[in-house]
C-alpha cells in the first residue's frame, strides 16, 4: 500500500472516530446536564456542527475529509477515486466511527459497548433521513463543483446543524455514523434493527444526488469566485 494512501485512510479513520466521539459524547453530556430534551438536542447540535467544521478543516487536504461512505460513493461515481480506494475509505470510516463511540462511552464511565435500544424504525424517520442525506450530498458537491471547496467545512457544519432540526430523524445522513451509533444506548443511539432502513434510504439518496449534481454541475469549475457566466460556461460544456 502506498504511503499516500495509508495517510488518506488513516485520516478517514481518525477523523470519523473523533466525529462520532463528538456526536455521542456531546449527547451523553447533554443528558447529564439537562432533563429538557429540546436543550439536549441544541447542545448535541452545536457540538456536532463544531466538531464537523474543525475536522473537515484539519483533514480535507489529506483525504478530502469524507467521514461518510455516501460522500465516498459519490466521489467514486464522479471519478475522484478508484473502487479499491473507495472500499478502503468505507472500511476506515465504519471502523473509525465504532471506535469513536466506544471512546465516548468510556469517557463517560459507561460500558465500552452498550447496544442501543432507541427505536427509529418508523417510516417517516427513514424517509426523513433519506432527505437529510440528499440535501447534505447536494450541498457538499455543489459547493465543491462550483469552485468553492475551501468553504465546504462551513457549509457542512451549517447544514447538519439545521438538519438536526428540520428533519424528524435528526439527520444521521451517513451510513458509518448510523452503524456506529448502535454501540451506545444513549441520547444519540439507534437500535440495530433500525439500521437497515436508514442505510437503504441513505444509499437511495446517494443515487439521486449523483443525478442532481450531474444536471446542475456537469463540469466542475475551478476554485475561485463563482459568477453566473462561469456557471453558464460550465453548463455549456455538458
Image (tube, rainbow, N blue to C red):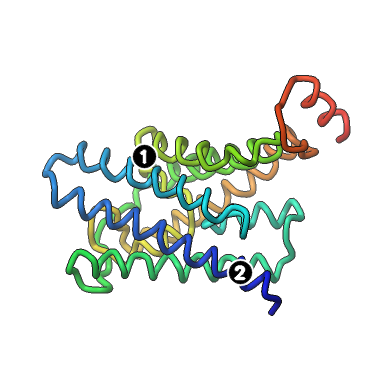
- Residue 11: quadrant of the picture: bottom right
Which residue sits furthest top?
228
Residue 50 on image: x %, y %: 39, 44
User: For the residue labelled by badge 2, is the local secondary structure a helix, a strand or a loop?
Assistant: helix
Going 70% across and 41% down the picture, which residue do you hit? 211
Tell me how many marks there are: 2
Residue 173 on image: x %, y %: 47, 48
In the rendered image, which residue does mark 2 sit on? Answer: 7
Which residue sits furthest right?
237
- Give the distance between the C-alpha atoms of the residues marked 2 and 1, in whole angstroms: 31 Å
Residue 231 on image: x %, y %: 77, 26
Q: Is residue 28 above or below residue 100?
A: above
Residue 133 on image: x %, y %: 51, 45
Going 45% across and 43% down the picture, which residue do you hit? 127
Badge 2 crowding class, 10 Å Cα cut-off, few under 14, some 14 to 19, many 20 or more, is few
Going 85% across and 27% down the picture, which residue do you hit? 233
Residue 164, disc: 1
- Residue 76: quadrant of the picture: bottom right
Quarter holding the N terminus? bottom right
Residue nearer the viewer, 118 or 80: 80
Relative placement, left or right, of 134 versus 52 is: right
Quarter holding the C terminus? top right
Q: Earlier in the sequence, mark 2 or mark 1?
A: 2
Badge 1 crowding class, 10 Å Cα cut-off, few under 14, some 14 to 19, many 20 or more, is many
- Residue 81: quadrant of the picture: bottom right
Going 25% across and 66% down the picture, which residue do you hit? 105
Residue nearer the viewer, 124 or 13: 13
Foreground mark, 2 or 1?
A: 2
Which residue sits furthest left?
35
Amino acid at each position: 500500500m502506498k504511503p499516500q494512501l495509508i495517510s488518506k485512510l488513516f485520516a478517514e479513520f481518525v477523523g470519523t472516530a473523533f466525529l462520532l466521539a463528538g456526536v455521542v459524547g456531546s449527547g451523553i453530556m447533554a443528558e447529564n446536564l439537562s432533563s429538557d430534551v429540546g436543550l439536549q438536542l441544541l447542545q448535541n447540535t452545536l457540538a456536532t456542527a463544531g466538531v464537523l467544521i474543525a475536522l473537515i478543516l484539519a483533514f480535507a487536504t489529506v483525504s478530502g475529509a469524507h467521514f461518510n461512505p455516501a460522500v465516498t460513493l459519490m466521489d467514486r461515481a464522479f471519478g475522484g477515486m478508484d473502487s479499491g480506494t473507495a472500499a478502503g475509505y468505507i472500511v476506515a470510516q465504519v471502523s473509525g466511527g465504532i471506535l469513536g463511540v466506544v471512546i465516548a462511552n468510556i469517557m463517560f464511565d459507561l460500558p465500552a459497548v452498550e447496544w442501543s435500544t432507541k427505536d427509529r424504525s418508523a417510516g417517516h424517520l427513514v424517509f426523513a433521513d433519506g432527505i437529510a442525506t440528499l440535501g447534505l450530498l447536494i450541498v457538499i458537491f455543489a459547493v465543491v463543483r462550483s469552485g468553492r471547496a475551501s468553504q465546504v467545512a462551513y457549509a457542512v457544519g451549517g447544514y447538519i446543524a439545521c438538519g438536526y432540526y428540520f428533519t424528524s430523524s435528526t439527520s444521521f445522513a451517513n451510513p458509518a455514523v448510523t452503524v456506529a451509533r448502535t454501540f451506545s444506548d444513549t441520547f444519540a443511539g439507534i437500535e440495530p434493527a433500525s439500521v437497515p432502513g436508514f442505510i437503504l434510504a441513505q444509499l437511495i439518496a446517494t443515487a439521486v444526488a449523483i443525478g442532481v449534481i450531474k444536471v446542475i454541475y456537469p463540469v466542475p469549475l475551478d476554485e475561485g469566485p463563482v459568477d453566473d457566466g462561469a456557471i453558464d460556461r460550465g453548463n455549456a460544456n455538458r
